[in-house]
Amino acid sequence: MADRYEPQTFEAKWQARWKAANLFETRQDPGRPKFYGLDFFPYPSGAGLSVGHCRNYIPTDVICRMKFMQGYNVLHPMGFDAFGLPAENEAIKNRTHPGPMIERYAENYRRQMELIGIGYDWSRSFRSSDPEYYQWTQWIFKVLLERGLAYQRMAAVNWDPVEKTVLADEEVIGGLGWRSGVPVEKRSIPQWFFKITDYAQRLIDDLDTVDWPEGIKQMQRNWIGRSEGVQFRMRVAMPHEEKSDEEFEIVERAPHFEVFTTRIDTVYGMTFCVLAPEHPSIETLEGFVDEAHRAEIRAYRENAKRLSDTDRQATTREKTGVFTGAYAINPANGERVPIWIADYVLMHYGTGAIMAVPAHDARDYEFAQKYGIPVQPVIGPAKGVSPETLPFESKDGFLVHSGEYSGLSVAEAQKELGQWFEACDLGTRKVQYKLRDWLISRQRYWGCPIPVIHSADGEIQPVPDEDLPVELPEVEHYEPSGDGSSPLAAIDEWVNITDQDGKLGRRETDTMGGFACSSWYFLRFCDPHNKRKGWDPAEVEYWMPVDCYVGGAEHAVMHLLYARFWTKVLYDAGLVPVQEPFQTLRNQGMVLAPTPFRAPREGETLGVGEEGIQITFEEAHSLPEDQVFHRYEKMSKSKGNVVTPDEIVEKYGADALRLYELFVAPFEQNVQWSNEAIHGQVRFLSRVFKLVDECRSAYDPLWRDAIDTGESSEAGKALRRLTHHTIRRATDDISGFAFNTYVAAMMEFLNGVRDVLKTTPASEIRAEASEMLETFVLLLAPAAPHSADELWDLLGMEGFTYQQDWPELDERWLARETVTIAVQVNGKLRDTLEMPTEADQATLERVALESERVRPHLEGKTLRKVIVVPGKLVNLVVG
């Protein structure tokens, strides 16, 4: 037997044996509890896996392996999120078809996952681009359509005039197309939406029922953006035709618009109002202002079209706007306020118009300062006191300069002003959400076709179930069409079809965005080969919800929100038994790798937050050392800093990689990758192999009989205490996702065993040493399964460690044999004593009085009282 860790001699062997035995195939044995462990649905890229990806796959594998050994039926599947923009763009770049490309990428991912020993049930695997899968994505679309939750309407899209294609928001960078670098334009085209807004409150409320990181929950609450306030009308004040320009009146034919505010208490401080550039009232408003203002309005609106919503709301971007030349009337005090247009107001949030109160809103204050608009404080820290600094955004103050409402607290004013607006029929109190309906349409080829037919009379008909799936046609060219429509629109033989009435109709040529396919894949894993339905209700009843879902926090308000929405819709339709798909969620930290940068040269500029110009590693080697600096960045293909599991496994072994990823830091923390640090795990595994090699001659597979009947020596007792303390620590740490301390416990176990064996050979404590060896191998198995199986085999045992029972904890060995007793004199600590746990009161009192540290504090004094708290302290009262 090798007395060191030599992974090249055995890791591939065990992977082959696991595969031949179908070791990880899902079992549903009656009487066993279930555990569903799942990693986020990955998109397989051409770069393959990095060791950064392993940061979540390995820990999930560890907990699933332990659960199976604990007697659970474990579902641990893996598939691939194959549809969508990244795959299509990469296929266009590589001049290949996305289908075969994704198949190659997925196969490489599987190879790498098997290389590091991940125990997936590959018999349940699928790609979201498989027709057998997206047939049921289309069926769920029809469920939403039938329930009034899918609809089509005109909506603005990002249009690249050079690429002649619609761009997703993430493809617009600083208002420019990501490939062309030219300003994008806004165009309105028919788009499909899912009515997620109908579920806004339930999506907030049910966050209280799941075990998720609080940060993720709060991100979802903020994204949904529930707010309570007042929505009221503002009438436009036009110049009086027979009086001077300074005199205004409300004219019936003039437009009006509505604003929503959560701070109706500040309405007396409104000094201007703002419309979003897309607000429909603007076109009517232009008819009542002079040509100079009309020209400025049109120019500003045209510029705003080129910006994405993300750019418009960036906190670092300077506020811009244009005065319309028109005014509106503040209904609270009858004063006129100027109407501005500004792109920091979005049409799809609220009403697309705001009352601006610069004294009490930072964004409005910045805008007012820039354009010289008056600022009127109406909330102060105390009654009758105006704020000293602005903007004053506290909700705990009192009203000032607010007419009859002055002196009221913010809460009182919100209630009374809300009632006044409703009584005067000026507005209504309402709940509003920031969340917008989910835009699902993509004018792209590589996506799930939307299963509807547009009839000649304009009716939308769902494709019958028996005609699903609507498959993507085989095409040579799938690039964007050049006119904004989907490439599918040009395939007449696919588009033209007879509708349900026997008349000529047209297929919908938009495809669904990739988030549709990843919003239900966890259900398909429960029953992946069902040809008659998306899933058998009994299978979903058994496996759902997912017990542990693991992946990156970057998906907090997209995938996780959409999956929750679809699950709730399916629950309401009576199709699934759960309202929440993922009971427990855990987010891993990122893996950072050193990335070379250099200082900018003449003529080069840095972006916001950038510290230097990123260069390749080849460039870094060609420059003088003093011109290059390294910074730890997220490991990614674009940064050129990827470390692959292939190179690490070849050099150090899969188990060393697994242990390193688990041990390097707490699961949630970012880590800085270090090849050198893996050496520590290689040394640890070698020490484990050496220990087993030295002790295996003393191993007795019948140790249970001996240990139950025999009397343990002091060394044997010490070894048993160490063994069972480690069982408790390993079990609790893995369950609590404290993988770094789990590995640390194994290292401490090894050190503790070594200390015992220094004084007593294993041959003299055969039963206890045998229990230790068996326990050590089984506790190590989830983290280092190849090594564990190799050691198990070399101990003469049959089967795989995965099939063995998790070590059983004997609580008796957790009890401490000694306790620390504090000795006080008149309440002041004078000594501590290590005493047997069974020591009685008289013994504790005697030992305390004999203490050399205590006696000097008793000399010349009378002992008046002795207070003993068993197991904790002895207090000597003297005088």
Image (cartoon, helix red, strand yellow):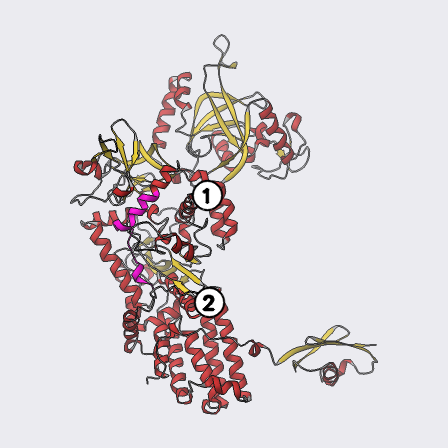
Q: Nearer the viewer, residue 92 or 362?
A: 92
| Rendered image quadrant of residue 446 | top left
Q: Position of residue 533 (x, y in %)?
A: 32, 49
Q: Amino acid at mark 2?
A: Ile
SS majority, magenta? helix
Q: Position of residue 868 (x, y in %)?
A: 74, 76
The reply to whether the magenta stretch includes residue 275 is no
What residue is pinned by disc 2?
A: 734
Image side of residue 143 versus residue 726, left or right: left
Instruction: Point out which mark residue 223 bears.
Output: 1
Is residue 169 visible in the rendered image? The answer is no
Image side of residue 44 versus residue 409, left or right: left
Residue at the spot x=32%, y=72% of the render? 653
| Rendered image quadrant of residue 349 | top left
Q: Position of residue 263 (x, y in %)?
A: 56, 34
State the SS at label 2. Answer: helix
The residue segment tinted magenta is 120-140
